Image: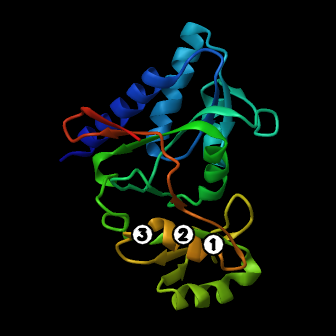
């Protein structure tokens, strides 16, 4: 399996997702990750070619840059609180189309945009699909936390069965800081057969902003396969 084939699958999934769903005058949420780069390039291309007058809301600094670089109209959630379609990636997708997101640290803003969209369209490659969350994604559930609370939160996560680690930056000293100025904890709960229950337990802990578990939010998943074909699953 070469990287070229994997990238071809990602690109084909992204193009098909855009072709199947984008229509003139839509307000689009733009997520983060490697598959979204291909999606935004295609959105920019058809927006110009067909004069679609699309408006795009970013979920992260990366997606803000993608919108600008592809000469799309940048708008905000304040201006357009009702979004037609949100395109995003995921770290893992289970058979019920529940997601783990937040490997890139943008899951809180991504969840806000997704929750205000009529449709959440997820674009991934075949490595992200699993029966249960936690099977292929072994880095734990990303959890954004208020900095002053992180030690207490980690202790409480241990009490409910998690193995939390404070995410550290790679090219600077200290922890990763989210676009919102918060820390990120990655909490391993093993194979997750009850994501809704785990999500509710975590969110009851004071100091937690939100989790990277996206439960019952996905409308469709476009999966790039090993041979470059695209599998589409609708909820």
Which element carries disc 1, helix, strand or loop?
A: helix
Give the image location of residue 124, x and y in percent: 38, 44
Above or below, 88 relative to 39: below
Q: Nearer the viewer, residue 98 or 10?
A: 98
> Can you identify the residue that label 3 sits on?
194
Q: Residues within 10 Å of mark 1 (few under 14, many from 20)?
A: some
Task: Give the Cα separation between the discs numbered 1 and 3.
Answer: 15 Å
The residue tagged 1 is: 203
Query: Marks 1 and 2: in contact by CB < 8 Å?
Result: yes
Q: Can residue 168 be seen from the camera position used here? A: no
Which residue lies at the image location 47% right of the left edge and 46% below the top edge? 89
- Left or right, 170 with respect to 208, comes to left
> Which of the two marks, 1 or 3, is nearer to us in this view?
3
- The residue positioned farthest toward the top in the image shown: 50
Give how far across and how far down residue 152 sits, in percent.
67, 89
Which numbered circle lies on residue 53? none
SS class, disc 2: helix
Give the quadrant of the C terminus.
Answer: top left
Q: CA distance from mark 2 to mark 1?
A: 6 Å
Number of marks in the rendered image: 3
Identify the residue at horizontal 34%, vertical 73% (top origin).
191
Q: Position of residue 202 (x, y in %)?
A: 58, 75
Say few, some or many: other residues with alpha carbon within 10 Å of mark 2 (under 14 / 14 to 19 / 20 or more). some
């Amino acid at each position: 399996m070469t990287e070229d084939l994997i990238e071809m699958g990602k690109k084909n999934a992204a193009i098909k997702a855009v072709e199947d769903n984008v229509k003139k005058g839509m307000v689009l949420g733009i997520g983060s990750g490697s598959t979204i780069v291909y999606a935004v390039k295609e959105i920019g291309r058809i927006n110009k070619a067909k004069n679609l007058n699309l408006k795009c809301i970013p979920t992260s600094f990366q997606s803000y840059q993608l919108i600008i670089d592809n000469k799309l109209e940048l708008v905000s959630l304040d201006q357009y609180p009702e979004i037609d379609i949100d395109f995003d990636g995921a770290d893992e997708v289970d058979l019920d189309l529940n997601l783990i997101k937040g490997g890139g640290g943008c899951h809180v803003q991504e969840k806000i945009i997704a929750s205000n969209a009529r449709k959440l369209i997820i674009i991934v490659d075949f490595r992200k699909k699993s029966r249960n969350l936690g099977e292929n994604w072994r880095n734990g559930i990303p959890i954004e936390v208020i900095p002053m609370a992180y030690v207490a939160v980690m202790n409480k996560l241990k009490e409910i069965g998690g193995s939390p680690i404070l995410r550290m930056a790679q090219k600077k000293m200290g922890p990763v800081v989210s676009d919102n100025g918060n820390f990120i904890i990655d909490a391993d709960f093993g194979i997750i057969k009850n994501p809704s229950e785990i999500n509710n337990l975590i969110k009851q802990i004071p100091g937690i902003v939100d989790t990277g578990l996206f439960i019952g939010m996905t409308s469709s998943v476009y999966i790039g396969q090993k041979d470059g074909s695209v599998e589409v699953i609708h909820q």
